[in-house]
Image (cartoon, helix red, strand yellow):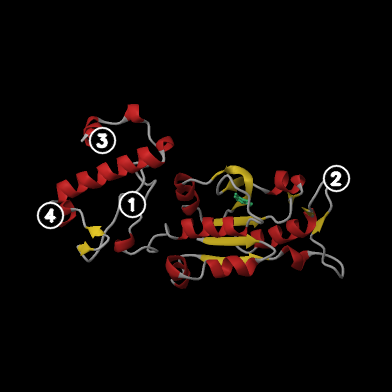
Amino acid sequence: MRIDVVSLFPDFIDQAAAVGVVGRARERGLLTMQGWNPRDYADGNYRRVDDRPFGGGPGMVMLIEPLRAALAAARAADPAPVRVIYMSPQGRPLTQAKVRELAALPRLVLLCGRYEGVDERLLQTEIDEELSIGDYVLSGGELAAAVVVDAVARLQDGALGDAESAVQDSFEGDGLLDCPHYTRPVEHEMGRVPDVLLSGNHAEIAKWRRQQSLVRTLERRPDLIDEGALGKADRRLLAA
Ligand code: ADE
Protein backbone atom coordinates (compact mmCIF):
# COMPACT_ATOMS: atom_id res chain seq x y z
CA MET A 1 0.00 0.00 0.00
CA ARG A 2 1.06 3.56 -0.66
CA ILE A 3 0.21 6.56 1.54
CA ASP A 4 1.01 10.12 0.50
CA VAL A 5 0.72 12.87 3.10
CA VAL A 6 0.17 16.51 2.21
CA SER A 7 1.37 18.56 5.15
CA LEU A 8 3.39 21.62 6.13
CA PHE A 9 5.35 19.22 8.36
CA PRO A 10 5.84 16.07 6.27
CA ASP A 11 8.91 15.03 8.31
CA PHE A 12 6.78 14.74 11.41
CA ILE A 13 4.63 11.92 10.01
CA ASP A 14 7.60 10.28 8.36
CA GLN A 15 9.30 10.02 11.76
CA ALA A 16 6.15 9.00 13.60
CA ALA A 17 5.90 6.11 11.13
CA ALA A 18 9.55 5.05 11.36
CA VAL A 19 9.52 2.81 14.44
CA GLY A 20 8.02 -0.48 15.59
CA VAL A 21 5.49 -2.38 13.52
CA VAL A 22 4.98 0.50 11.08
CA GLY A 23 8.71 1.06 10.60
CA ARG A 24 9.16 -2.64 9.90
CA ALA A 25 6.24 -2.68 7.46
CA ARG A 26 7.95 0.12 5.55
CA GLU A 27 11.32 -1.64 5.60
CA ARG A 28 9.67 -4.74 4.18
CA GLY A 29 8.00 -2.72 1.43
CA LEU A 30 4.45 -3.42 2.71
CA LEU A 31 3.92 0.31 3.01
CA THR A 32 5.42 3.15 0.96
CA MET A 33 5.08 6.73 2.14
CA GLN A 34 5.83 10.10 0.66
CA GLY A 35 5.31 13.59 2.04
CA TRP A 36 4.28 16.63 -0.01
CA ASN A 37 4.72 20.11 1.41
CA PRO A 38 2.28 22.72 0.06
CA ARG A 39 4.92 25.37 0.80
CA ASP A 40 7.00 23.87 -2.02
CA TYR A 41 4.11 24.75 -4.34
CA ALA A 42 3.50 28.26 -3.00
CA ASP A 43 4.33 31.43 -4.92
CA GLY A 44 6.37 34.49 -4.08
CA ASN A 45 9.29 35.25 -1.82
CA TYR A 46 7.24 34.42 1.24
CA ARG A 47 5.82 31.18 -0.14
CA ARG A 48 2.57 32.02 1.50
CA VAL A 49 0.24 29.09 2.29
CA ASP A 50 -2.49 30.84 4.28
CA ASP A 51 -4.51 34.05 4.48
CA ARG A 52 -7.11 35.76 6.66
CA PRO A 53 -10.66 34.39 6.67
CA PHE A 54 -13.37 36.25 4.77
CA GLY A 55 -15.98 37.44 7.21
CA GLY A 56 -13.35 38.09 9.85
CA GLY A 57 -12.52 36.14 12.95
CA PRO A 58 -9.39 34.67 14.44
CA GLY A 59 -6.82 32.45 12.76
CA MET A 60 -5.82 31.85 9.19
CA VAL A 61 -7.19 29.68 6.41
CA MET A 62 -5.02 27.58 4.11
CA LEU A 63 -4.98 28.82 0.51
CA ILE A 64 -6.44 26.74 -2.30
CA GLU A 65 -3.59 26.88 -4.81
CA PRO A 66 -0.58 25.51 -2.87
CA LEU A 67 -2.76 22.67 -1.57
CA ARG A 68 -4.22 21.94 -4.98
CA ALA A 69 -0.74 21.76 -6.53
CA ALA A 70 0.63 19.54 -3.74
CA LEU A 71 -2.40 17.25 -4.03
CA ALA A 72 -2.00 17.06 -7.81
CA ALA A 73 1.66 16.09 -7.41
CA ALA A 74 0.74 13.44 -4.84
CA ARG A 75 -2.03 12.03 -7.06
CA ALA A 76 0.29 11.87 -10.07
CA ALA A 77 3.01 10.01 -8.17
CA ASP A 78 1.33 6.64 -8.75
CA PRO A 79 -1.28 5.38 -11.22
CA ALA A 80 -3.27 3.28 -8.71
CA PRO A 81 -6.72 4.62 -7.77
CA VAL A 82 -6.54 6.86 -4.74
CA ARG A 83 -8.81 7.90 -1.86
CA VAL A 84 -8.13 11.47 -0.71
CA ILE A 85 -8.88 12.06 2.96
CA TYR A 86 -8.89 15.31 4.92
CA MET A 87 -8.10 14.98 8.63
CA SER A 88 -10.33 17.28 10.67
CA PRO A 89 -12.45 17.36 13.82
CA GLN A 90 -15.47 17.92 11.52
CA GLY A 91 -14.93 14.53 9.89
CA ARG A 92 -16.74 11.25 10.45
CA PRO A 93 -15.18 9.33 13.35
CA LEU A 94 -12.35 6.92 12.56
CA THR A 95 -13.30 3.42 13.71
CA GLN A 96 -11.59 0.04 13.41
CA ALA A 97 -14.11 -0.85 10.69
CA LYS A 98 -13.06 2.26 8.75
CA VAL A 99 -9.40 1.38 9.33
CA ARG A 100 -10.05 -2.08 7.83
CA GLU A 101 -11.73 -0.50 4.81
CA LEU A 102 -8.83 1.91 4.23
CA ALA A 103 -6.20 -0.81 4.78
CA ALA A 104 -7.62 -2.75 1.84
CA LEU A 105 -7.13 0.15 -0.60
CA PRO A 106 -4.04 0.42 -2.81
CA ARG A 107 -3.49 4.11 -2.09
CA LEU A 108 -4.42 6.91 0.28
CA VAL A 109 -3.63 10.61 0.24
CA LEU A 110 -3.97 12.22 3.66
CA LEU A 111 -4.39 15.99 3.75
CA CYS A 112 -3.41 17.72 6.98
CA GLY A 113 -4.68 21.20 7.77
CA ARG A 114 -3.14 23.77 10.09
CA TYR A 115 -4.51 27.08 11.37
CA GLU A 116 -8.30 27.42 11.33
CA GLY A 117 -8.63 25.06 8.41
CA VAL A 118 -8.65 24.81 4.65
CA ASP A 119 -10.65 26.82 2.12
CA GLU A 120 -13.96 24.95 1.84
CA ARG A 121 -13.91 25.05 -1.97
CA LEU A 122 -10.79 22.88 -2.06
CA LEU A 123 -12.44 20.37 0.27
CA GLN A 124 -15.61 20.28 -1.86
CA THR A 125 -13.59 19.68 -5.03
CA GLU A 126 -10.64 17.51 -4.05
CA ILE A 127 -11.61 15.48 -0.99
CA ASP A 128 -13.36 12.08 -0.99
CA GLU A 129 -13.77 11.83 2.74
CA GLU A 130 -13.19 13.78 5.96
CA LEU A 131 -12.11 11.85 9.06
CA SER A 132 -11.76 12.76 12.74
CA ILE A 133 -9.77 10.77 15.29
CA GLY A 134 -11.91 11.99 18.19
CA ASP A 135 -13.93 14.78 19.73
CA TYR A 136 -11.05 17.07 20.64
CA VAL A 137 -9.12 19.64 18.66
CA LEU A 138 -5.49 19.21 17.69
CA SER A 139 -3.36 22.05 16.38
CA GLY A 140 -3.07 20.31 13.04
CA GLY A 141 -3.96 17.15 11.15
CA GLU A 142 -0.47 15.61 11.37
CA LEU A 143 -1.00 13.60 14.54
CA ALA A 144 -4.34 12.41 13.18
CA ALA A 145 -2.71 11.36 9.89
CA ALA A 146 -0.02 9.50 11.85
CA VAL A 147 -2.81 7.65 13.66
CA VAL A 148 -4.36 6.58 10.35
CA VAL A 149 -0.97 5.50 8.98
CA ASP A 150 -0.23 3.40 12.08
CA ALA A 151 -3.65 1.74 12.28
CA VAL A 152 -3.68 0.95 8.55
CA ALA A 153 -0.03 -0.18 8.35
CA ARG A 154 -0.35 -2.83 11.06
CA LEU A 155 -3.18 -4.47 9.09
CA GLN A 156 -1.09 -4.96 5.95
CA ASP A 157 -0.49 -8.65 5.24
CA GLY A 158 2.77 -9.65 6.94
CA ALA A 159 3.07 -6.53 9.12
CA LEU A 160 2.23 -8.33 12.36
CA GLY A 161 3.89 -11.50 13.54
CA ASP A 162 1.67 -14.30 14.91
CA ALA A 163 2.41 -13.06 18.41
CA GLU A 164 1.00 -9.64 17.53
CA SER A 165 -2.01 -10.97 15.63
CA ALA A 166 -4.67 -8.34 14.97
CA VAL A 167 -7.73 -10.58 15.22
CA GLN A 168 -8.00 -10.50 19.01
CA ASP A 169 -7.56 -6.73 19.29
CA SER A 170 -10.17 -4.50 20.83
CA PHE A 171 -12.95 -3.59 18.35
CA GLU A 172 -12.09 -6.49 16.04
CA GLY A 173 -14.58 -9.25 15.27
CA ASP A 174 -17.09 -8.98 18.10
CA GLY A 175 -16.53 -5.25 18.66
CA LEU A 176 -15.67 -5.72 22.35
CA LEU A 177 -12.72 -4.32 24.28
CA ASP A 178 -9.75 -6.63 24.65
CA CYS A 179 -9.34 -8.76 27.79
CA PRO A 180 -6.51 -8.23 30.33
CA HIS A 181 -3.10 -9.83 29.65
CA TYR A 182 -0.45 -11.20 32.02
CA THR A 183 3.10 -12.51 31.73
CA ARG A 184 5.79 -13.72 34.14
CA PRO A 185 6.20 -13.78 37.08
CA VAL A 186 3.12 -15.63 38.33
CA GLU A 187 3.55 -14.15 41.80
CA HIS A 188 4.38 -10.48 42.23
CA GLU A 189 3.86 -7.94 44.99
CA MET A 190 1.33 -6.32 42.64
CA GLY A 191 -0.71 -9.50 42.58
CA ARG A 192 -1.02 -12.99 41.20
CA VAL A 193 -1.87 -14.09 37.67
CA PRO A 194 -5.46 -15.45 37.57
CA ASP A 195 -5.37 -19.24 38.08
CA VAL A 196 -7.46 -20.00 35.02
CA LEU A 197 -4.69 -18.67 32.74
CA LEU A 198 -2.27 -21.19 34.29
CA SER A 199 -4.73 -24.09 34.06
CA GLY A 200 -3.94 -25.19 30.50
CA ASN A 201 -7.70 -25.58 29.97
CA HIS A 202 -8.18 -23.72 26.70
CA ALA A 203 -11.97 -23.76 26.79
CA GLU A 204 -11.98 -22.27 30.29
CA ILE A 205 -9.37 -19.69 29.29
CA ALA A 206 -11.44 -18.63 26.27
CA LYS A 207 -14.54 -18.37 28.48
CA TRP A 208 -12.68 -16.25 31.06
CA ARG A 209 -11.32 -13.94 28.40
CA ARG A 210 -14.75 -13.50 26.86
CA GLN A 211 -16.20 -12.71 30.27
CA GLN A 212 -13.47 -10.15 31.00
CA SER A 213 -14.07 -8.49 27.62
CA LEU A 214 -17.80 -8.31 28.23
CA VAL A 215 -17.44 -6.86 31.75
CA ARG A 216 -14.85 -4.31 30.67
CA THR A 217 -16.88 -3.21 27.70
CA LEU A 218 -20.05 -2.81 29.78
CA GLU A 219 -18.17 -0.86 32.45
CA ARG A 220 -16.03 1.35 30.25
CA ARG A 221 -17.78 1.55 26.90
CA PRO A 222 -21.45 0.62 27.24
CA ASP A 223 -21.99 2.39 23.90
CA LEU A 224 -20.20 -0.50 22.15
CA ILE A 225 -22.54 -3.19 23.40
CA ASP A 226 -26.21 -3.90 22.77
CA GLU A 227 -27.06 -5.83 25.94
CA GLY A 228 -30.39 -6.94 24.56
CA ALA A 229 -28.66 -8.56 21.58
CA LEU A 230 -26.24 -10.65 23.67
CA GLY A 231 -26.50 -14.41 23.28
CA LYS A 232 -27.40 -16.80 26.08
CA ALA A 233 -23.78 -17.81 26.69
CA ASP A 234 -22.66 -14.18 27.04
CA ARG A 235 -25.51 -13.40 29.41
CA ARG A 236 -24.54 -16.37 31.55
CA LEU A 237 -20.91 -15.13 31.63
CA LEU A 238 -22.05 -11.68 32.75
CA ALA A 239 -24.29 -13.11 35.47
CA ALA A 240 -21.49 -15.32 36.81
N1 ADE B 1 -7.22 18.03 13.19
C1 ADE B 1 -7.42 18.72 14.34
N2 ADE B 1 -8.11 18.00 15.22
C2 ADE B 1 -8.38 16.80 14.62
C3 ADE B 1 -9.08 15.64 15.03
N3 ADE B 1 -9.67 15.53 16.22
N4 ADE B 1 -9.15 14.62 14.15
C4 ADE B 1 -8.59 14.72 12.93
N5 ADE B 1 -7.92 15.79 12.50
C5 ADE B 1 -7.81 16.83 13.34
Q: CA distance from mark 1 to mark 3?
A: 23 Å
Q: Secondary structure at mark 3?
A: helix
Residue 80 in view: no
Report the amino acid beneath label 2. Gly
Q: CA distance from mark 3 to mark 4?
A: 21 Å
Q: Are marks 4 and 2 in contact (CB under 8 Å)?
A: no
Instruction: From the image, tell me which residue sits under label 2.
Output: 56
Report the amino acid beneath label 1. Val
x 46%, y 73%: residue: 27
Instruction: From the image, tell me which residue sits under label 4.
Output: 199
Quarter of the rendering containing residue 6: bottom right
Q: Kindly give the residue lying farthest to the front in the view shown.
A: 189
Looking at marks 2 and 3 on the same chain, the residue that comes earlier in the sequence is marked by 2
* Circle 4 crowding by C-alpha within 10 Å: few under 14, some 14–19, many from 20: few
Instruction: From the image, tell me which residue sits under label 1.
Output: 167
Q: CA distance from mark 2 to mark 3?
A: 55 Å
x 25%, y 32%: residue: 235
Q: CA distance from mark 4 to mark 2?
A: 67 Å
Mark 2 or mark 3: which is in front?
3
Q: Secondary structure at mark 1?
A: loop
Looking at marks 4 and 1 on the same chain, the residue that comes earlier in the sequence is marked by 1
- Taking the image as shown, residue 79 lies to the left or right of residue 233, namely right
Mark 4 or mark 1: which is in front?
4
Instruction: From the image, tell me which residue sits under label 3.
Output: 238
Q: CA distance from mark 4 to mark 1?
A: 23 Å
